[in-house]
Amino acid sequence: MKKYQIAMYIRLSKEDDKVKEESNSITMQRLLLQKYIADNFADYELTEFCDDGYTGTNFERPGMQEMLERIKSSEINCVVVKDFSRFARDYIELGSYLEQIFPFMGVRFISVNDSYDSSNYQGSIADIDVNFKNLLYDLYSKDLSEKVRSSLSIRKEKGQYVSANSPFGYEKDPKDRHALLVAEDEAEIVRQIFSLTVEGHTSIEIARMFNETGVKTPIEFKIAKGKTSRIPKGERFLWSGSTICQILRNEIYIGNVVQKKYTKDFVGGRNRLNPQEDWLITYNHHEPIIDKVVFDKVQEGRGKKRPLQHTPTHLLVGKLVCGCCKKNLRYRAGLNPYFSCYHRYSNTMEHCVQKVNAMFLEQYILFMLQGKLQENGELEKLHMEEMHKLDKAIREGKAKRQVLAAKIEKLKQHHFENYQNYANGTINSFQSDESVLKSVQKELESLNDSLRELETAYCDVKCDQNKQYVGSQFAVLSEEMIEHYIDKIEVYDEQHIEIQWKENVRASCVC
């Protein structure tokens, strides 16, 4: 009897949690699936993947991504879920996995409550009730999202404050969570910020003054009031110029609530800034902290806000920290790109990083990484990982190629049937699918070209078992290498750099 490597997938969304569906709880799903597997399988190894608080409208879930990676690595050959909606609420995506991807990869899929087992549909398409259920789950999710969005929109139109967090200087009214009350201890600091700005001090100067005199930061107030728990990156939390700027331009401090500044194009998408004329402003919503005359004077003195510009980022951003204040270093592009500590202007420390050449850092870190891997004897392992990575990409490409080929056949069939009906007089007009067909065919050609390149690269790596990684694959630093091997890099100057390796690369290295 075949031994199954079973993935038990469990998901609970925030929407599920709000409606308190006991049957959908993580515990109930786990018990249901464990009993089903024990009753229906004899020889198996079980791995649980869980996403608690994630929507099913997309696949951007950590548990789901980990499971799919294990499937692509041939470590999983059976997936068991409570129902289709736990796996996905997107009708098209779910259909692709059920009818194309999982069958191609030899993965059995079981949905317990839907009485669906893909082993019963080998070589055929699932019953219409399965497809209908998938569509219903998709429509239900979209309908629920629209209802939540509509409910929030109505509350905003009524002038209610709907954010879960209160802004610095205010706290939620215990009698009405949509109302704001002045928090005097915080409000006094807001007044100081505006007063100092009117006197002519810059945001950087104000931040430095506050840091020198030990004024509590907004996050420290939240911690003291038990609203959150955080640990500072350095020795303590510090004020920054950007925090001061955010306070100075926030209309909340003159009693106004500005909402609908951002919208999402779709569920799970990114926020998009709306035109200012589309913003919803509720005037005199709550007690102001700052007089409007003072607020307007500050805005005039600060000038117009410059439009946001896209600036190139760097693969070391987020890994480099200042050795002095422990804050992330900021990247500056240009002819001679460099990293520096922006907080050196506002904190009270004298030895923060002023400027370190970005290209020097790249070469140094690459050199140290090569040496560390050579020392730990991991180059051969990396060689095998590269082969595995290429093999995985090839299998993914072939699975996608099968989906595209099936789509082309369906388009051709639809095109032919439309033409036949038009020729027989069944329909009055003929609508060609030729443009869509050409687009899909072009995508398939591009995919075939990529597959040929991947297969060539795989053969090259496989044939050259003694390939020296340091001289070829690791000639350039990559984001993947940095994320895999390096925890963080503390920079003091170009002569003093400390690399903290992750557990898979033993010990640390000091320059």
Image (cartoon, helix red, strand yellow):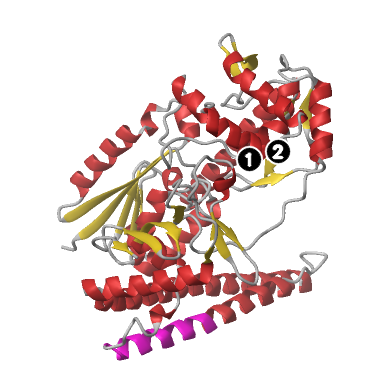
Residue 201 position (above or below residue 85): above
Kind of residue indicated by mark 2: Thr
Which residue sits at x=28%, y=70%? 372
* Residue 434 x/y as whole percent: 72, 75
Per the image, the residue denoted by label 2 is 202
Do the residues under discs 2 and 1 have CB atoms within 8 angstroms?
yes
> Viewer-proximal residue, 401 or 181?
181
Per the image, the residue denoted by label 1 is 241
Identify the secondary structure beneath mark 1: helix
Mark 2 closeness class: few <14, some 14–19, many ≥20 residues within 10 Å: some
Calculate the distance from the C-alpha at mark 2 to the C-alpha at mark 1. 8 Å
Judged by its main secondary structure, the magenta piece is helix
* Residue 462 x/y as whole percent: 31, 86
Residue interval drawn in magenta:
449-465
* Residue 82 x/y as whole percent: 36, 42
Is 115 contained in the magenta span? Answer: no
